[in-house]
Image (tube, helix red, strand yellow):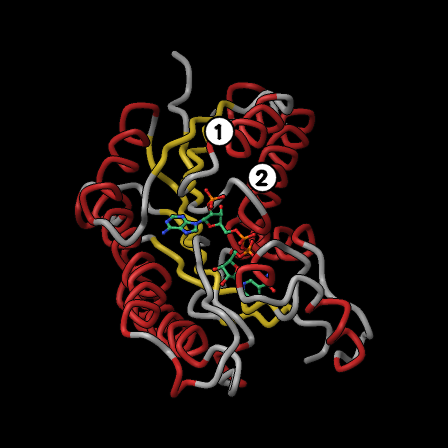
Amino acid sequence: MSATPLVTVITGASRGIGAATARRLAQDHNGRKTTQTKTDLNPLVIVLTYASNQQAAEAVAADVRTFGVDAHIVQANVADAGQVKDVFSVADNVGQLSALVNNAGVVGLIKPFADYSVERIAETVNVNLTGSLLCALEAVNRMQTDRGGAGGAIVNVSSRAASFGSPNEFVDYAATKGGIDSFTIGLATEVADKGIRVNAVRPGLIDTDIHAAAGAPNRVQELADRIPMKRGGTPDEIAASIAWLLSDEASYVTGALLDVGGGR
Ligand code: NAP
């Protein structure tokens, strides 16, 4: 009898850190295939979500498949509870959910708080904070051992902004990441004896498209000097941390907020 496929859901995996994480998890799984016998390694399926960039999501899925890992893409706004349910229905159809990476996130234009619109605040909170909670809600209901699940791991993508507050830039964004940190600690404690580990990575300045959305496409280069390592990070460097937190190597790690910021 063939082993049940284990499913990892990664939100916002069409670009940046989410895309790098999908590729990294597929690569790691492929590596394990060479060291373990086929019978003791469950196949991995990655469900990748995106907001609007279907072509980019398809390209990431194609990269994942080159490592012999199945991939499905789903368009979903994580702030919409119905669309989030659809994502997890796709996961249910292809195997048993064992991991969630709550990565999808948005940031508004850099400006003083007094100039924010109500719509901007709502969008930032709904996507970054509510979206992560909605996805985690679907995940724990499938993974908790006291609800018929087989356990699993969740990684929430927070930010070093949670500590700094991002004054004069995007305090709304920083506040959502502070919320993610509290949520990580609380949920981790709640489900620690129910087979689920919950951790967060807190990236510093990482070279992705998100800075263009904030109106500062060259932000990483411009601010690199403020970072002790004198450079921005790469999506691959965050993906490596996420992959470790999801892996059995981190089997006794839960409720951790892992700073990956080049010393800042
Ligand atoms: P990115 O390159 O801008 O990619 C964002 C991803 O999220 C894309 O896949 C996008 O899909 C998706 N997305 C956007 N809005 C969404 C929504 N409403 N519902 C579902 N998906 C949505 O961002 P990134 O830099 O990789 O950031 C990933 C995570 O890392 C975010 O949580 C961010 O806050 C965090 N982070 C980033 C940095 C950094 O310096 N880059 C630092 C700290 C933390 P489409 O491609 O379809 O638009």
Residue 25 badge: 2
Percent x, y of residue 258: 56, 69
- Identity, as a three-letter code, of the amino acid under mark 2: Leu
Q: Residue at x 26, y 51 (%)?
A: 140
In this rendering, position of residue 122 left or right of residue 31:
left
Q: Which residue is mark 1?
A: 44
Which element is circle 1 on?
strand
Percent x, y of residue 209: 60, 54
Marks 1 and 2 sit apart, C-alpha to C-alpha, by 9 Å
In this rendering, position of residue 74 left or right of residue 226:
left
Which element is circle 2 on?
helix
In this rendering, position of residue 188 left or right of residue 85:
right
- Identity, as a three-letter code, of the amino acid under mark 1: Leu
Residue 191: which quarter of the image? bottom left
Q: Quadrant of the C terminus?
A: bottom right
- In front here: 263 or 122? 122
Percent x, y of residue 146: 19, 50
Q: Residue at x 53, y 77 (%)?
A: 161
Percent x, y of residue 223: 73, 76
Q: Quadrant of the N terminus?
A: top left
Q: Residue at x 68, y 50 (%)?
A: 236
Indicate whether 239 appears above or below 29.
below
- In front here: 17 or 92? 17
Mark 1 surroundings: few (<14), some (14-19) or many (≥20) residues within 10 A: many
